[in-house]
């Protein structure tokens, strides 16, 4: 079945600086490529420098003259997050776009970050929470747009307040849902905190729908030696133009949230087909787990305590 093509227009971003986590492959690489093509200088914080170099070469093949800056970042280490924050603050260049995109999904067995947090909660949420806090002066200086990636998994589930780190009973998908609900609640609370403090930051959340990215592929570093059955099915559906999106279309909601001329503070963007798993990007209603401001406030306070990185 032929797939109908769709896209968005990214405005001229000459003179702007963007930071995109997870830019070494998949959705993040697509986002970084489009921002570079629009004229932005793109900072690509990566865990694997060799993989980052290959990603930068891929972007330059498509965008000759792309302005790219590679930097080291392991979101599962608060020390690494702090080091990147210190490096970028020392450069004293305003940041106009921050795309909190990187993530890890469903290790079959419970793993922890360098700081002892459950890997998905510690990487997907706490790492991005701390990074945003460390970059706050630069985001304020750039009157930045901050876009944080949630996931369609966040349609259901809840924050497991009784066992945030899943020490008593680990379930990979439930832990992933929690981490992505946390990402969404963080993005929404950042909207409220920025308005109250006068930071001038526009915060949005987005999700890519369902697409054959590497999140469910073989990932030896998280204990997955082979592709999951789920990702094989998603690849087949995507190839045949059925229901789900592609890696190319999955980047569009975050791009629209970050650069759209009519983007509203606190808005939520995702694919528009039924079920929000594929289709053209656009605004959508918040899912139930994201609608409770008290949960968002509690999460923010807890995250400051766990990371020891306050927003100030």
Image (cartoon, rainbow, N blue to C red):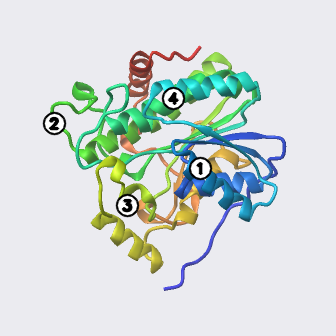
Question: Tag 3 or tag 4, which sits nearer the N-term?
Answer: 4
* Front disc: 2 or 3: 3
Question: Tag 1 or tag 3, which sits nearer the N-term?
Answer: 1
Secondary structure under tag 3 reads loop
**Residue 154 position within the rendered picture, expressed as x and y whole percent measured from the top left:** 37, 46
**Which mark is on residue 52?**
1
Question: Tag 2 or tag 1, which sits nearer the N-term?
Answer: 1
* Front disc: 1 or 2: 1
Crowd class of label 1 (few under 14; some 14 to 19; many from 20; radius 10 Å): many
Q: Residue at x 67, y 29 (%)?
A: 201
Q: CA distance from mark 4 to mark 2?
A: 29 Å
**Where does label 3 land, which residue?**
217
Question: Tag 1 or tag 4, which sits nearer the N-term?
Answer: 1
Q: Is residue 51 above or below residue 133?
A: below
Q: Nearer the viewer, residue 62 or 187?
A: 62
Q: CA distance from mark 3 to mark 1?
A: 19 Å
Secondary structure under tag 1 reads helix
**Where does label 4 land, which residue?**
80
Secondary structure under tag 4 reads helix
Question: Tag 2 or tag 4, which sits nearer the N-term?
Answer: 4
Crowd class of label 3 (few under 14; some 14 to 19; many from 20; radius 10 Å): some
Residue sitting at the far bottom: 1
Q: Residue at x 53, y 84 (%)?
A: 2
Q: CA distance from mark 4 to mark 3?
A: 25 Å
* Front disc: 4 or 2: 4
């Amino acid at each position: 079945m032929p797939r109908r093509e769709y896209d968005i227009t990214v405005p001229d971003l000459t003179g702007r600086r963007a930071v995109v986590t997870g830019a070494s492959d998949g959705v993040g690489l697509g986002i970084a490529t489009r921002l570079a093509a629009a004229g932005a200088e793109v900072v690509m914080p990566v865990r694997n420098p060799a993989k980052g170099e290959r990603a930068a070469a891929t972007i330059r093949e498509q965008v000759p003259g792309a302005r790219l800056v590679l930097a080291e970042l392991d979101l599962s280490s608060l020390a690494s997050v702090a080091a990147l924050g210190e490096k970028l603050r020392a450069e004293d260049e305003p940041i106009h776009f921050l795309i909190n995109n990187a993530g890890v999904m469903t290790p079959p067995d419970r793993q922890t970050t360098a700081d002892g947090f459950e890997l998905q909660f510690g990487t997907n949420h706490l790492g991005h929470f701390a990074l945003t806090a460390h970059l706050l002066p630069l985001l304020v200086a750039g009157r930045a747009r901050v876009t944080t990636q949630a996931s369609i998994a966040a349609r259901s589930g809840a924050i497991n307040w009784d066992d945030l780190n899943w020490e008593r009973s680990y379930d990979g998908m439930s832990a992933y849902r929690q981490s992505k609900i946390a990402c969404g609640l963080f993005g929404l609370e950042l909207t409220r905190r920025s308005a109250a403090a006068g930071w001038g930051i526009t915060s949005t959340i987005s999700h890519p729908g369902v697409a054959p990215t590497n999140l469910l592929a073989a990932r030896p570093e998280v204990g997955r030696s082979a592709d999951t059955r789920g990702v094989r099915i998603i690849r087949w559906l995507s190839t045949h133009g059925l229901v789900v999106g592609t890696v190319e279309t999955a980047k569009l909601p975050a791009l629209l949230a970050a650069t759209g001329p009519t983007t509203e503070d606190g808005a939520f963007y995702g694919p528009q087909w039924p079920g929000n798993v594929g289709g053209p990007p656009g605004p959508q209603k918040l899912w139930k787990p994201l609608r409770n401001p008290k949960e968002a406030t509690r999460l923010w306070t807890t995250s400051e305590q766990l990371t020891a990185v306050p927003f100030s």
